[in-house]
Amino acid sequence: MPWRAAPRAALTSPLTLIIAAVTALLACFLGTAAILQASAAGGAAVTYQSGIACPDYYGPVFSKDNVPAAVAPQVVDSVRRNAPAHGFAAPVTSRYTPYLTGTEFNGDPNYKVVLAHRDQALPGHLNLTDGSAAAGFWLGTVVAGAEGIKTGTTPSIRGTPLPPVTGLYRDLADPAPRWWCSQQRNAVVSRLANDPLDSVMFATDGKTFDDTVRALGVPVIKTLHLSFYEAPPKTVSEAEDLQERSKALIASVKADLGARGLGDAIVGSLPFERSVEISNQAESNVLISILPLAAISILVGCAGIGTVALQWYQRRHPQLRLLSARGSGPGALGLLAVAELGVPIVAGGVAGGVLARLLLGVYGPPGELDDGSMVWGSLVAAAILLVSLALLAGVIAVRTHREFELGRVRSGGRRRVKILAFFPWELLTAAVALLGWNRLVDYSKGSRIGNPLPQVDPLALTYPVFVVLTVGLIAARLAWLALHASHRARLWSRPALQLAIRRLASARAPVTGVLVIGTLAIGTLATGIGIARGQEEALQTKSAIFVGAETRVDTESVVGTGQVRLPDSVGDTTTIVGELTGTGNVVLVVDPRTFRRAATLGPLDGAEVDRLLSGLSSAGAGVPAIRIGSDAARKTALPAGLGDARAIGELPMFPIIGTKAGYVISRDSLGAAQLRGVPKWSVLSSSSMTQVTEALSSVGVATAVNRVTRESALDALPFYVVSWTFSFMALLGAVLGVVAVVSLLVAVEVRRRQNALAGALVLRMGMRPRALLASHLMELGALSGLAVVIGVVCGVSVAGLSVPRFDPATFLPPQSALPDPTPLALTVLAVGVLVVALAGWIAMRSVRTARTAELIRA
């Protein structure tokens, strides 16, 4: 029976098997990759949100101010008893008293202290500089050092003695270390806002704290805080499970306290709940955004299976006619195709799903997958395989039914192909691209109205693909017309070129098909990479201009006026800037000698900035200044009575100022009185925030609450979501590139007999092998070169137009811009050269190994 022998009969046409397997592989790869990409995006979003949240905020938080001292132990007991039932370990409890005045050290009663205790805080999370962990209290080194307080000292409050000071700890810096993140308000003393004699004394254990509070008769605990240091969730499902368990624990504690008549003694909250919602939205945004692209790619894969079915039908036509004459129905003949090609299709589909998982780290976001994502990806791949097999059987069944049972001639099919070929598809794709462009105009507005992520419009996101497709179709139609008219070419004085033109003209259909696929592949790849990298670079440049350096800290005027020198530990990485506003201008006061070593310039030219900064010391009327922005009014008056500015040059933007109209002047241009009139001074540094704040504290300079780093200045997630979305477009382009290369090599292999015979004959007629090789390279190089040039130019142009539109933070300068496309263009060109060389070698190999007599007889 032919159906039994079908798998073995398939081996007689290995090329068809390879094409069927590769087509199924690519379709299942892209279908599975779409699911995995979205799941990984959700995991990456959760990881990002976990990184910016306090480490004890992933689970439930129980916190309240002014809790009666007698009630606090009952609250702690209730949380501890209910936590294990919901999968939580013992909570970390933090307790702080109000400021206790009249605290006496060494006979001086003018101190104010907060008595505190936090589980696990010491000795692991407080830096002990002197003393031990013996029962008592630890005092901060700022007050201890300034007032000469030593370990062993026994303080008292209004005559009531306290346990002794058994240790001195280094005061927590502002900002506090990450473990103390949620306790910043209570555990860190702001020296800018509080009396220098204020301090927080930490009890070494809970019993010491409780006994002291009881002995002092403190009526309320100023802040009671209970939280859990859970492992950060890595996927959306883990985060959602953690939130559900947290809600259940909050409900249990509330019911427990309510039964004791203490229902309002504590407030439970879910600080990470909003982060989970945002992560879920990020996953949905990526999935919805790439679904149209995935659907298009899967449809292309199905069309490829249909093409394979038609090729198989033509090759097996005599056998199918015989089987039909013997009584086999169209359905049985369709199953014959499945029996012959089903194994390679299934094998290719399985390989595609496996490759999508294995290569996720290459093309996907850096996030963990949800447990169910592989199941859904496998279901999608299985559905694609079922549709592919059904399509294969259906195409064969329909063709055999129409030809063998209805007796319809094939000319009707050829007529339909002609109609489809001449239909203006480029007008249809251009209309879709125009519609997508119109929907793209308002893409980034969502992030400006409080939404942390840009709005999703799948039609807008397909705009780049349809533009590239339109250009590819136009190029293919022009190539078709040119090849149709190529018989008029008379270039026999250059036989290699003439032969190349004739070979292209004899294979117009595969040539235009490869051109469309190649152009679409390269254009889509260039567009996806351009937009993805454009948003990544935009995040870096925007944060550089916004912050001005890796770290920016507002500080006291004594640093700006020079009364206090910067510490040597950060002196080589730090500069000081002042800021004034008024008269319609923003004025930045910089130190030209140190500004460049600390500041980040973003897209600005460093050499030009150096030249202008050196010119700020030039002599002349007015204050030498660098004009920033493009204010048409050109106001020269400087605020605070500094006089008029004398512009020595212009820059479109500048760190901290951005693109606002303003001037940059030198500190050396101002006198001592004018420097004291500058209302705001900041320290810019390439060092970390901790290094800067500790260094300033070491010389007695306080830092204000306005602190920012490049890493935390902007919410990076909207930029990442755009990048993750268009990385899938780049993946689609790479897959289409593989299809284009395979199509080109298959086209050469399909015409192997024809090329071998023609090549052998022209060599017999006197053409040199080098000229024949040049002819093949001209043919293949013209096709590949046209696809590369059109694809790169179109892709880069579309990306250049689209990058600013996809900018999720258009309110921050500079505008998102296309990254340098040169590396991509050179890479594509190099790959194109290698493919052409390989295809030319295959063509020449068939000529050298050909036996002319056998080819003529065949």
Image: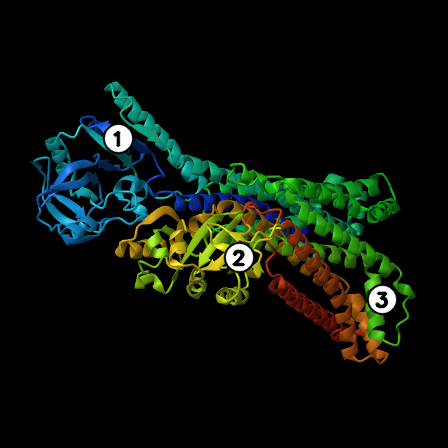
Q: Please identify, in this view, whether the residue under mark 2 or under mark 1 is nearer the observer.
A: 2
**SS at circle 2:** strand
Mark 1, residue position: 79
Question: Which residue carries the number 2 mark?
Answer: 645
SS category of the residue bearing label 3: helix
Q: CA distance from mark 2 to mark 3?
A: 71 Å
Question: What is the x, y in percent for residue 16?
Answer: 70, 56
Q: Is residue 373 left or right of residue 554?
A: right
Residue at 68%, 61% (x, y): give it.
741
| Amino acid type at image mark 2 | Ala
| Distance from the alpha carbon under mark 2 to that under mark 1 | 64 Å
User: Residue placed at 72% from the left, 73% from the top?
Assistant: 845
Is 205 above or below relative to 588? above
CB under 8 Å between discs 2 and 1: no
Q: Nearer the viewer, residue 152 or 488?
A: 152
Query: On the picture, is 346 further left or further right than 267?
Result: right
